Amino acid sequence: MKIGIISDIHGNAEALQAVLKELKNVDKIVCLGDIVGYGADPVFCIEKIRELEIPCLKGNHEAAVTGELDLGYFNEDARLSALWTRKQLKEHILAYLSGLNRRITICQDVLGVHGSPRQPLWEYILDEQTAEEIFSYFDFQIYFVGHSHIAGYFTFHRKNKVVQYVSASRGAEVVIKRDHSYIINCGSVGQPRDRNSQASFAIFDTEQLIVHIIRIDYPIARAQDKINRANLPGFLAERLSMGI
Ligand code: ZN
């Protein structure tokens, strides 16, 4: 079976459509949260996810627009975009976002979460130390995560306890070894921050035991134009072409 893993769409309809086109032949798709926030098309993106019956986790941006998280934790641009996003969403859509789960079992020993298994909404797994703590505490073969918008993966040799990090800012092919565990960040569909502006996503081939992290072009200028026309903070448009 081939499973598409997407995360951090952030209201970017152009990036989402480009990624879904690449995923049209997979058996299922899972979304790790942050459908909304930053971008100008939150409603389109939520409706697309629901129409395709893609199981989706709650990200910190969903928790922000539904009022579960205090916007005081957000920086100015994130806060302004959360307030703007909330205004675009009707009650039934807010109810859908409120009801999203924080964890998902993708298949046996393969799990998904937005941030980290310890703190699904908030924690970033950015360094080997954090990854090692998670590898030591939780039992799994693969944990798919999003949240940092930085594509890459940590490997953990279960016998000698060595943790290594590999960047996937230009894509990657991860061959899953039985004696290793993995934390794999599929990167962000709609707002990559690893200095590559291309949309990021992953495909997990459960028979071959390979995860491909893939980067593709999408019409960035169109997404930027919509952000500017919506009077969202200008930096939210600028950063898309810089990949930051
Ligand atoms: Zn995000």
Image (spheres, rainbow, N blue to C red):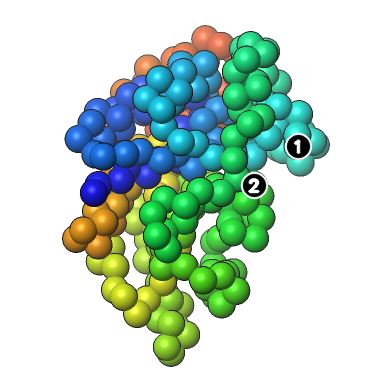
Q: At x 68% / y 34%, what residue is drawn?
A: 63
All told, the count of numbered labels is 2
Nearer-the-camera pick, 218 or 236: 218
Q: Amino acid at mark 1?
A: Leu
Which residue is the site of mark 2?
121
In this rendering, does residue 213 appear at all? yes
Nearer-the-camera pick, 238 or 153: 153
Contact flag, marks 1 and 2 (Cβ < 8 Å): yes
Question: Is the CB of mark 2 within 8 Å of ligand 1?
Answer: no
Which residue is the site of mark 1?
69
In this rendering, does residue 194 appear at all? no
Q: At x 29% / y 52%, what residue is drawn?
A: 204
Is 67 displayed left or right of 78 in the figure? right
Is 38 displayed left or right of 181 in the figure? right
Badge 2 crowding class, 10 Å Cα cut-off, few under 14, some 14 to 19, many 20 or more, is many
Rendered location of residue 93, percent (x, y) = 60, 18
